[in-house]
Image (cartoon, rainbow, N blue to C red):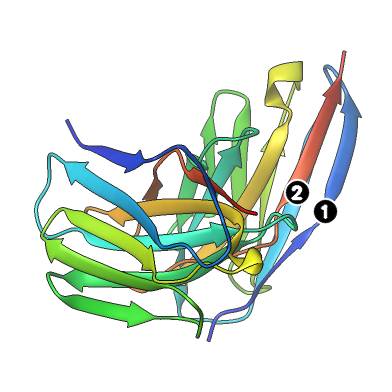
Amino acid sequence: SQTIHQWPATLVQPVGSPLSLECTVEGTSNPNLYWYRQAAGRGLQLLFYSVGIGQISSEVPQNLSASRPQDRQFILSSKKLLLSDSGFYLCAWRPAGNTIYFGEGSWLTVV
Amino acid sequence: GENVEQHPSTLSVQEGDSAVIKCTYSDSASNYFPWYKQELGKGPQLIIDIRSNVGEKKDQRIAVTLNKTAKHFSLHITETQPEDSAVYFCAASPRYSTLTFGKGTMLLVSP
């Protein structure tokens, strides 16, 4: 079956510290992968998407970066976190066609 | 690019009533329209979707209608239950493109 895993589920990090959120998918090959952020206003903001290994497109300029070292692995990173990076981060994937499926999300609090 | 407007932002109904959430989109090339339900602290879950070659789709108590001429689509939930309380997102996309989401509707169903 096709599944998506995202971790850690909750993270509290000090300002200026690094970040690494990881996402993996199972049961498919060459999916499109996405990172979204959801702030307090509830909207879903697309941060990055990837159509293949090493191929990353950024939707908004920011303090974050993404990498896809393997076909089914997508990583969201930061070298130095800001308070404004706090939020709910969602990995998502599109195995085929248009339908996007989301992971369970990671709560990041920067203190 | 695509722009999706969603209304209302908050909707309160009594258990057993119907709920309707409406979305409009701007790109006439969009042909895929999914709806997601997000419970507190979880990732959005796909509940129903519709493609541009049909005008209506039903799945038990939920239905989606699409009017391509007017560029709007709606989610209808009948016989609402407290467990329907959540944030609902509509989205639209042209073929093989990324989804553009509405800002969400918080549905509250009172017993």
Q: Residue at x 85, y 46 (%)?
A: B10
**Residue B96 visible from this viewpoint:** no
Quarter of the image for residue B4 reads bottom right
Q: Which mark sits nearer the N-terminus, 1 or 2? A: 1
Whether tag 1 and tag 2 are in contact, CB under 8 A, the answer is yes
Which chain does the residue under circle 1 lie in? Answer: B
Quadrant of the rendering where the C terminus of chain B is positioned: top right
> What residue type is disc 1 on?
Ser
Q: Nearer the viewer, residue A56 or A85?
A: A85
Q: Residue at x 47, y 71 (%)?
A: A80
Which residue is more in the foreground, B53 or B4? B4
What residue is drawn where x is 50% and y is 41%?
B43
Using a 10 Å C-alpha cutoff, classify the residue at mark 2 as few (fewer than 14 neighbours), some (14 to 19) or many (20 or more).
many
Q: Is residue B40 above or below residue B2?
A: above
Q: Element type at marker 2?
A: strand
Q: Position of residue B55 (x, y in %)?
A: 54, 54
Task: Give residue A25's quadrant in the image.
Answer: top left
Q: Which residue is mark 2?
A: B105
On the image, the x and y values in percent for residue B79 come to 75, 20
Left or right of A70: which side holds B4? right
Residue A75's place in the image compared with B95, above or below, is above
Q: For mark 1, what is the residue? A: B9
Q: Is residue A72 above or below residue B101?
A: above
Q: Nearer the viewer, residue B81 or B45?
A: B45
Amino acid carrying label 2: it is Thr
Q: Are marks 1 and 2 on the same chain?
A: yes
> Separation of disc 1 and disc 2 at Cα?
4 Å
Q: Is residue B62 above or below residue B52?
A: above
Label 1 sits on a secondary structure element that is loop
Which chain hosts label 2? B
